Amino acid sequence: MFKLLRADFYRAFRFKIFYLLISVNALVGLISVLNMYSYRMAFGVQYNAVRVLEQGMGGGFSFLGILSAIIVAIFIGHEYSSGAMRNKIMVGCGRSKIYLSKFIVSAVMCVAVYFSYHAVNFILGSVLLGWGDAVFSDVLMLFLAGLFLTLAYCGIFTFISMLSKSTVLSLIFGILGSLAVLMAVMILLGGLQGEYIADPNDPNGAILVPCRWPAWLQWLARAFINVMPSGQSAIISMGEGSRYGLYIALSAVWVVLSGAGGALLFRKVDLK
């Protein structure tokens, strides 16, 4: 196991896309901080570093999911295209150990990309925006929720990449899948919030009609939103997330299920 990890980390440290995405997410963090600061100076809106932290969950475009999908799909896909995966199995490396090594190294890279955004916020955002009256424990739980969210994405995309054996398919499933789930989440959120109709007492006004879906359907919609990583990122990014402990637990479940299930199914993958 140690030799597998050493070889995979050696590849990771030479993986140029990894450093590119660290730079990209750090730049996004810098833009977010400066954007919040400009709004604060121009309009007096009391944005602080907590809001930047929330936006760093990537909800608007499922950005964390896309970055994680790119890292995992290309890193693991190269193992298949180069024949390295088949060679490792032929020399006696256990499939479960190979799978675990790929997940650990991919997770380290995804987490490093996640950190790059927040490092900018913790340093520059603290100076320019401050943290307002935020409680340290809440900030920590928010940060940890994003960290586990990233691990959940990594676990799911490792599962897809290890079983699909194709970089292209893994990228398609990862990127388009993240966006499709996000779109479904936004549609469900809109439906749960109700709809505006013309106010019969005011020709120029409108009133909000509560959601008319059956109670069981509303429950399923909320469950889907909270369980899916893209749903969690969307809720947190809108500043509406408060159940960080629940999100951490659900993300941990994704990691365990994708890791255990992927390791079992990888034993049956034909590498001929």
Image (tube, rainbow, N blue to C red):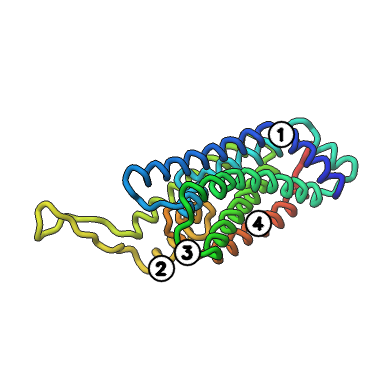
Q: Spot the residue most to the bottom.
A: 215
Q: Which residue is mark 1?
A: 15
In this rendering, the label closer to the viewer, 3 or 4: 3
Labels 2 and 3: the sequence-earlier one: 2
Disc 4 to disc 1, C-alpha distance: 24 Å
Residue kind at label 1, given as amino acid type: Phe
Determine whether 67 is above or below 206 in the image. above
In this rendering, the label closer to the viewer, 1 or 2: 1
User: Which residue sits at x=41%, y=51%?
Assistant: 47
The location of residue 199, given as percent across then percent down, is 14, 58
Residue kind at label 3, given as amino acid type: Ser
Q: Are marks 4 and 2 in contact (CB under 8 Å)?
A: no
Mark 1, secondary structure of its residue: loop
Q: Which residue is mark 2?
A: 216
Mark 3, secondary structure of its residue: loop
The location of residue 35, given as percent across then percent down, is 42, 41
Q: Is residue 137 left or right of residue 47?
A: right
Determine whether 78 is above or below 42 in the image. above
Residue 242, which numbered label? 3
The 10 Å Cα crowd at callout 1, few under 14, some 14 to 19, many 20 or more, is some
The location of residue 13, given as percent across then percent down, is 75, 37
